[in-house]
Image (cartoon, rainbow, N blue to C red):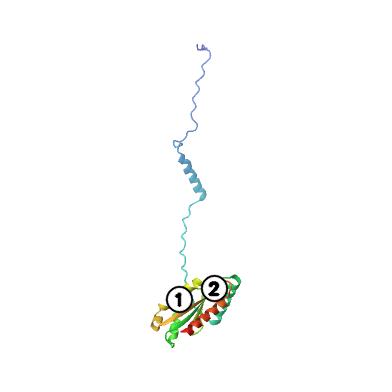
Amino acid sequence: MPEPVDPAIPPKPARPRRTKKFVLPDHHHDEREGERAGEHIDAFLDGPVAPPRSRPPAAERVRRPVELDTRPDWMAALRQEAARHARYGRPASVLLIELTGGPVSAAVDRMARAVADAIRAEARETDRAVRLGALSFRLLLPETGGRAARILAERLDRAFRASPDSRSLGADLTIDVATAARQGTLEDALADSERRLASRSAGR
């Protein structure tokens, strides 16, 4: 039974119901909201995104044609390359180029110009060329083994044959390749090639 109520004691007022002090937003269940907030914070810390820089176009490298050396300059380059091979074993070759056929007259200079033009078109900037006589050229090829030297010799021959002067004058090229052996010297290889060229000339 409920306890009797004493009329002399006033009843306790009803305790008011507490309202929620903090109310969660409607989107509190959105897990991506935290990710988006993190992205905003990172963007603020990183600062504004700079537009990608456009690189200036690379300047096209202009190939310088090979010019003919004087005999003293070419001989100095030959000695220097021979010393590099002897000391460090670096490959080196020389092309011995001889003009054959064609008229032996004032047209020789025209044929020689055709050879020089072929050398300028096919040789590298590091190669050294010289005209040793009316019909003789030499091309020093640093850092070049026998196979690469023979390929260049073939290109030179094709370039010369394609020139108008060689076709009109009926001239040809004879090219021998001198490549320093691993245990030999560039001078010895060059001397051997000179003897081979002399033998060919004597046999004609």
Of the two numbered discs 1 and 2 on the same chain, state the one appearing first in sequence. 2
Residue 154 visible in rendering: yes
Closer to us: 83 or 128: 83
Residue in the image at 43% along x and 83% along y: 111
Left or right: 143 as drawn, with respect to 169: right
Residue found at the far front of this picture: 203
Crowding at mark 1 (Cα within 10 Å: few <14, some 14-19, many 20+):
many
Closer to us: 94 or 50: 94
- Tell me the kind of residue under disc 1: Leu
* Badge 2 element: strand
Residue 60 coordinates in the image, percent (x, y):
46, 68
Residue in the image at 41% along x and 78% along y: 161
Residue 135 visible in rendering: no
Residue 19 coordinates in the image, percent (x, y):
48, 28
Looking at the rendered structure, which numbered label has been put on residue 119?
A: none
Check if mark 1's residue and mark 2's residue have beta carbons within 8 Å: no
Closer to us: 191 or 3: 191
Q: Which residue is mark 1?
A: 156
Residue 163 coordinates in the image, percent (x, y):
40, 79
The Cα atoms of the two marked residues, 1 and 2, are separated by 18 Å
Left or right: 185 as drawn, with respect to 121: right
- Tell me the kind of residue under disc 2: Ala
Crowding at mark 2 (Cα within 10 Å: few <14, some 14-19, many 20+):
many
Q: Which residue is mark 2?
A: 92
Residue 53 coordinates in the image, percent (x, y):
47, 58
* Badge 1 element: helix
